[in-house]
Image: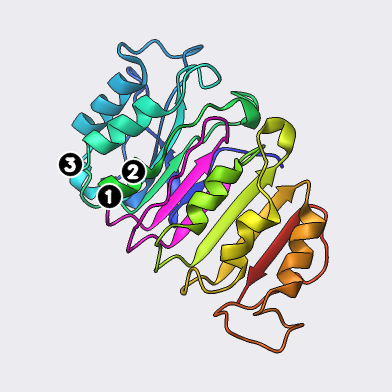
Amino acid sequence: MSVYHLEELHGLPAFDFPTPGQEVVLPETDTVAWRISYNPYVDEEEGGFDGRFQRFLATVAPARVRALIIGMWGETYDGDADDAIEQLVMAKDRLTSLEAVFIGDITAEESEISWIQQSDVTPVLHAYPGLRELGVRGGSGLSFPAVGHAGLRTLRFETGGLPGAVVRGVAASDLPALERLEMWLGVEEYGGDATVADLAPILSGGRFPALRHLGVQNSEIQDEIAAAMAAAPWSPSSNASTCPWACSATRARRRCSTASR
């Protein structure tokens, strides 16, 4: 799947935090999703991504920031997202209104999706109990151990290969408010080793009681996934209706299997 820079997040238009010297009229802090990115081939700001993030906090009203988009944090194919995530976590007492985060808003021109080196993203959930939406792009090095979060409503993974351990971590998580879950499983060549068995706790219909939309996409085993959806206990083809969301993909689709109310 092609990937582009986000145009909006959490219903707010994306706005690029300016580089030093750019003369830009900044919008009201709570009216946009702020994109913070550091491209080492173009930018020369002292301190790299960390320096840019700290300048962002010193420029806007942090307590009014509602959505953050993290773009490049340097050499994204050589360095992982640890530092960017650490910056987010350390700012938790300042970003008190944060509701949405996307980590890895990086296009193919900047880095192929399979080259993006991610990290464990769950510290963001631990740091921000008020978060409603979390998105991640890039699967290499990505980790998502089972986590509990009472308020998260949207969780999205865009990858060229989503590790099975991440799918199992999501399936074992306690996310009672989760309404929308999207996972690009990708291909085994890029680490996409998730199986239908890994998805089984989610497809059973009882794991996430608030779930209304499930997208399992971009996979080499899409036919198997679609068949598993059709055979799930909540499927329209079954006699049961125990799941709060209804299946809209009961046959194989080459690129995308989704279920939604």
Residue under label 1, please give it.
128
Secondary structure of the residue carrying tag 1 is: loop
Distance from label 1 to label 3 (Cα)?
A: 11 Å
First to last magenta residue range:
129-157
Distance from label 2 to label 1 (Cα)?
A: 6 Å
Q: Is residue 191 left or right of residue 250?
A: left
Residue at (78, 72) in percent of width and height: 250
Residue under label 2, please give it.
124
Labels 1, 3: front one: 1
Residue type pointed to by label 3: Arg
Location of residue 227 in the rendering, given as x and y in whole percent from the top left corner: 79, 66
In the rendered view, tell whether residue 257 sits above or below residue 209. above
- Based on the picture, tell me whether residue 174 belongs to the magenta stretch: no
Q: Is residue 147 left or right of residue 141?
A: left
Residue type pointed to by label 2: Val
- Based on the picture, tell me whether residue 138 belongs to the magenta stretch: yes
Q: Quadrant of residue 131?
A: bottom left
Residue 72 visible in this rendered orientation of the protein: yes
Q: Are marks 2 and 1 in contact (CB under 8 Å)?
A: yes
Labels 2, 3: front one: 2
